[in-house]
Image (cartoon, rainbow, N blue to C red):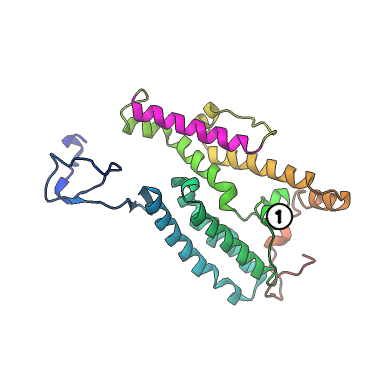
Amino acid sequence: LPISYGLVINEEKCEFWSSDREYSWTGLPEEATYVVQDGFKILGSAVGGDVALTMVVNKRVSQIQSLMSLLPSLQDATMHYQLLRDCLGYPKFNFMLRTIDIGRVGNAAAKFDEAIRESCGELFGNYILTRDDLHRIGLPVSRSGFGLTIAAFEGPAAYLGSLCQSAGLQEKILGGPDTVPATRLRDRRRLLYEAYTASFRPSIPGFTMEDLLKDPKPQNTLSKFGSKCRYEALLSSIPNSAARSQIEASALPSSGAWLDHHSSNPREYMSSLE
């Protein structure tokens, strides 16, 4: 930055890291700190190789699991659910999903989903949730779900949405849109977009990559498309028309209001009827 801004970097107090293990540090101050690990943590997320990313995500998931383990002690099913949905689930993990490609830390992200599964099982009276159940609770309330975000479903949308929102700033940092790094970044966004939309075929998204770059809330657009496709897949997988109608009815406006209702007689878990 120009000195006129009043900001001057003190290189001797900086930490230097390179993804190139054989990078030459010639010309940099000897007093500075040189990071030799696979990566490093910064602003709550991680930069570097898969090992470094996985370590940071695993640590974050462990912290979230510790908090989730306290929910049954409330002995209040509604409070358990609301805290899981609004505080201890996705809100605690959203930043990780927006800054790290879960494709590089698959097992670590899967531990978060397993924590959600276990906490929901406790919420339903130690019920063991199946894979289909996980798909259901991962849908928005407006689509007959529980509104509990599952990393495997929302991670790709969160990361791609973050890349789209910061595209302009990234190109400026990389020296302009025509530089080699900026070109590689555009290719990366395109690949992620194609992989995400292809996972829902034959459904066709109503937006292009260029639309997402102009969209003020690209993650929201991607998530809505994904939840719509998963909801339609859920309906098509149910052969029983009565059961299918029940799910469609639970997606009607205000049908999920009971999830936020506080009973005068709190219970430890939700009944199977609910």
Residue 265 versus residue 154 in the image, above or below? below
Q: Residue at x 75, y 49 (%)?
A: 253
Q: Position of residue 74 (x, y in %)?
A: 60, 75
Where disc 1 sits, the SS reads helix
Disc 1 residue type?
Answer: Asp
Residue 61 versus residue 266 in the image, above or below? above
Q: Where is the N terminus found, in terms of image quarters?
A: top left
Q: Quadrant of residue 87?
A: bottom right
Depth check: 221 or 121 in front?
121
Q: Residue furthest front?
A: 22
Residue 59 lies left or right of residue 90; in this view the side is left
Residue 274 lies left or right of residue 135; in this view the side is right
Q: Position of residue 208 (x, y in %)?
A: 57, 28
| Residue highlighted by disc 1 | 132
Q: Is residue 58 magenta?
A: no
Q: Is residue 196 magenta?
A: yes
Q: Where is the C terminus found, in terms of image quarters?
A: bottom right
Q: Residue at x 11, y 48 (%)?
A: 30
Q: Residue at x 12, y 51 (%)?
A: 31
Point out the stretch of residues depicted in magenta: 179-200
Instruction: Please tell me how crowded label 1 is: few (under 14), some (14-19), or many (20+) other residues with Cα within 10 Å.
Output: few
Q: Position of residue 132 (x, y in %)?
A: 71, 54
Depth check: 214 or 195 in front?
195
Q: Main secondary structure of the magenta part?
A: helix
Q: Position of residue 32 (x, y in %)?
A: 16, 50
